[in-house]
C-alpha cells in the first residue's frame, strides 16, 4: 500500500463511520481512529485539550498505550500542547510517587493502579519535552536512583531524564549510572543501560566531550562486565562507533575473558 500523507490519512479516518468503542484508547495509533465517527473524534480532541479530562483519559487507559508510534500519533492527531501534557503527566507522577512510597497505608489495588500510572506517565513524559524541565529532571533522577523501585521503571526514568538533560547533565548521569555502586542495581537489565548510552552517543553528533565521556564510561564498565549477553551487545555497538575502544588492549582482554573471538572495530 502506498504511503499516504498525514492530512490524507486524517481525512480518510474521519470519513469512516463506525460504532465508537466504549473506552477510548489509541491502540496501534491510526487503527483506532479509523473506527471512530467524525463527531467522536472532535469530542476527544476537545476533551484531550482539557487538563482535567485529559488526566482522566490518561489514567483510564491511555497511559497503557506506551508505544512510541502510538504516543506520536496522539500528538499529531489531537494537537495537544507539550506544555499541557507535561503538566498533567507531572501531576500524575507526583501523586503516584507518593502513593507507591506508602505501601503500608495504600490498599493493594490502589498500589497497583499507582504503579501502572507511574510507569506509563514516565514513558509518556519523554515525548513532551519543554523548556522548564528542572522538576522533571529532579523527579526522574529520584526514581532512577531509588533502588527499591522496579528496575525497568528506573531505566525508563533514566531514558526520560536523557530527553530533558543538557550535555553536562548527560555526561554526569552516564558516569553515575555506570559506576560500581549503581550499575549492578539494574541486573539483569544492565544491557538496557548500555543501549541508552549508545542512544545518547548517536544523538551527540558533533559533541566530542559527550561522546568521549560515553566511550570512557562504557569501556570501564565493559572491562568488569560479568553478563556475557550484556557484554556482547554493548561491545559490538561501541566497537562500531569507537576505533579507540575497538582496538584497545582492554577490550581484547575482556573478549578473551568472555571467550568471544577478537575482531577489529568498524567505523
Image: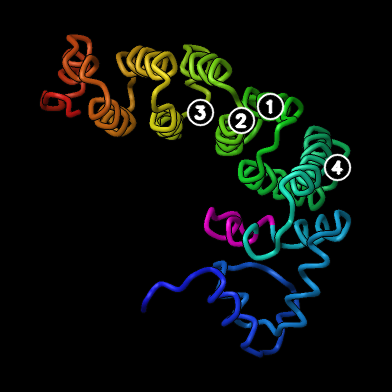
* Disc 3 + disc 4, Cβ < 8 Å: no
Provide the secondary structure element on which disc 3 rests: helix
Q: Name the residue under label 1.
A: 137
* Disc 4 + disc 1, Cβ < 8 Å: no
Q: Reading the chain from its start, which is encountered first: label 1 or label 2?
A: 1
What residue do we see at 71% from left, 47% from top? 82
Which numbered tag is attached to residue 202? none
Crowding at dot 4, Cα within 10 Å, few <14 / some 14-19 / many 20+, comes out as some
Closer to the camera in the image, 127 or 76: 76
The segment highlighted magenta reads: 63-74
Q: Name the residue under label 3.
A: 186
- State which mark lies toward you, 3 or 4: 3
Q: Mark 4 points at which residue?
A: 106
Q: Name the residue under label 2.
A: 161
**Image mark count:** 4
* Disc 1 + disc 2, Cβ < 8 Å: yes
Q: How far apart are marks 2 and 4 (CA)?
A: 28 Å
**Quadrant of the rendered structure where residue 221 is?**
top left
* Disc 2 + disc 4, Cβ < 8 Å: no
Crowding at dot 1, Cα within 10 Å, few <14 / some 14-19 / many 20+, comes out as many
Give the percent coordinates (x, y) of residue 207. 42, 20
The reply to whether residue 72 is in sight is yes
Q: Reading the chain from its start, which is encountered first: label 1 or label 3?
A: 1
Provide the secondary structure element on which disc 1 rests: helix
Q: In which quarter of the image is the C terminus?
A: top left
Amino acid at each position: 500500500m502506498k504511503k499516504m500523507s498525514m492530512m490524507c490519512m486524517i481525512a480518510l479516518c474521519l470519513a469512516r463511520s463506525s460504532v465508537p468503542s466504549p473506552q477510548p484508547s489509541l491502540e496501534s495509533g491510526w487503527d483506532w481512529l479509523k473506527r471512530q465517527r467524525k463527531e467522536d473524534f472532535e469530542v476527544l480532541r476537545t476533551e484531550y485539550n482539557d487538563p482535567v479530562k485529559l488526566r482522566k483519559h490518561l489514567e483510564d487507559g491511555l497511559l497503557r498505550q506506551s508505544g512510541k508510534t502510538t504516543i506520536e500519533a496522539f500528538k499529531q492527531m489531537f494537537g495537544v500542547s507539550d506544555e499541557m501534557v507535561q503538566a498533567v503527566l507531572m501531576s500524575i507522577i507526583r501523586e503516584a510517587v507518593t502513593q507507591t512510597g506508602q505501601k503500608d497505608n495504600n490498599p493493594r489495588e490502589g498500589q497497583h493502579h499507582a504503579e501502572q500510572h507511574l510507569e506509563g506517565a514516565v514513558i509518556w513524559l519523554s515525548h513532551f519535552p519543554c523548556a522548564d524541565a528542572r522538576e522533571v529532571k529532579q523527579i526522574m533522577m529520584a526514581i532512577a536512583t531509588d533502588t527499591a523501585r522496579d528496575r525497568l521503571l528506573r531505566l525508563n526514568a533514566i531514558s526520560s531524564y536523557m530527553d530533558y538533560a543538557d550535555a553536562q547533565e548527560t555526561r554526569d548521569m552516564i558516569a553515575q549510572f555506570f559506576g560500581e555502586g549503581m550499575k549492578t542495581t539494574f541486573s539483569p537489565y544492565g544491557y538496557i543501560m548500555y543501549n541508552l548510552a549508545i542512544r545518547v552517543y548517536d544523538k551527540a553528533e558533533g559533541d566530542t566531550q559527550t561522546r568521549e565521556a560515553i566511550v570512557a564510561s562504557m569501556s570501564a564498565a565493559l572491562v568488569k562486565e560479568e553478563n556475557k549477553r550484556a557484554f556482547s551487545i554493548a561491545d559490538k555497538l561501541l566497537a562500531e562507533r569507537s576505533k579507540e575502544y575497538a582496538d584497545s588492549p582492554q577490550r581484547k582482554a575482556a573478549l578473551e575473558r568472555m571467550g568471544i573471538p577478537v575482531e577489529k572495530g568498524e567505523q
